[in-house]
Image (cartoon, rainbow, N blue to C red):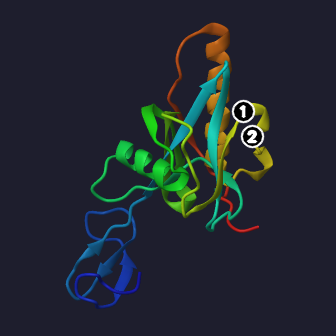
Amino acid sequence: MKFCSECAHPVSLQIPPDDNRPRYVCSQCGTIHYQNPKMVIGSIPVWEQDGELRILLCKRAIEPRYGYWTLPAGFMENDETTTEAALRETYEEAGARVELHELFALLNVPQVHQVHMFYRATLRDLDYQAGTESLEVKLFSESEIPWDDIAFPTVGQTLKFFFADLARIRKEGGTFALHTRDVRTPMRQKD
């Protein structure tokens, strides 16, 4: 940040009084510009038929990670809830209508100032299509997941959590758990 969004004067990085971390502060009007993590919200859309469960993934049509597979997700907008963001992103990226279930994964990615949240979801029908940010959308069984072509570590981790829970539930019963993790490996950019 170089200029104040309130008065357009230059800002400097300093620790304001009664604070403990550097912030951009305007020396002209005194505005403190707080910068906080961005929320990335998405879903894990599933379809089950004849006992086989498949997950809907999107092949990215944008950078970062153009051409790699991801769950439908994106940045939360102002004036929407996390569930509204998950529904919107699923429809925008995959053209899919889903019934949203509980929050399944919350992953902190401090090095890029983001928090990623994924909700479990069930596809309402098989009428889906790639949105403007997707090259393709496709249903995958666990054995078909293109693990080497997953766009982001948070997506790979969420899928691993999901399939581990599914295996446990099928063997022992029970329900899906809420998973949290700090992902400190670098988020991949361009190859």
Nearest the viewer among 76 and 95 is 95
Instruction: Judge whether 160 appears above or below 60 on screen.
Output: above
Task: Give the quarter of the image for residue 14.
Answer: bottom left
Q: Residue furthest front?
A: 127
Instruction: Judge whether 134 appears above or below 150 on screen.
Output: below
Instruction: Judge whether 102 appears above or below 44 on screen.
Output: above
Three-letter residue code for mark 2: Ile
Q: Residue furthest left?
A: 29
Nearest the viewer among 27 and 36 is 36
Query: In x, y percent, where is residue 162?
Result: 62, 30
- Where disc 1 sits, the SS reads loop
Nearest the viewer among 128 and 122 is 128
Marks 2 and 1: CB-CB under 8 Å? Answer: yes
Quadrant placement of the N terminus: bottom left
Task: Give the quarter of the image for residue 6.
Answer: bottom left
The residue that disc 1 covers is 141
Q: Residue at x 31, y 59 (%)?
A: 78
The residue that disc 2 covers is 145
Q: Residue at x 37, y 42 (%)?
A: 83
> Relative to residue 16, is residue 112 drawn left or right?
right
Query: In x, y percent, where is residue 97?
Result: 46, 42
> Relative to residue 63, is residue 97 drawn left or right?
left
Q: Neighbour class for label 1 at 10 Å: few (<14), some, many (≥20)?
A: some
Three-letter residue code for mark 1: Ser
Real-space Cα separation, disc 2 to disc 1, in angstroms: 6 Å
- Where disc 2 sits, the SS reads loop
Quadrant placement of the C terminus: bottom right
Query: In x, y percent, where is residue 35?
Result: 38, 66
Q: Residue at x 27, y 73 (%)?
A: 32
Nearest the viewer among 61 and 74 is 61
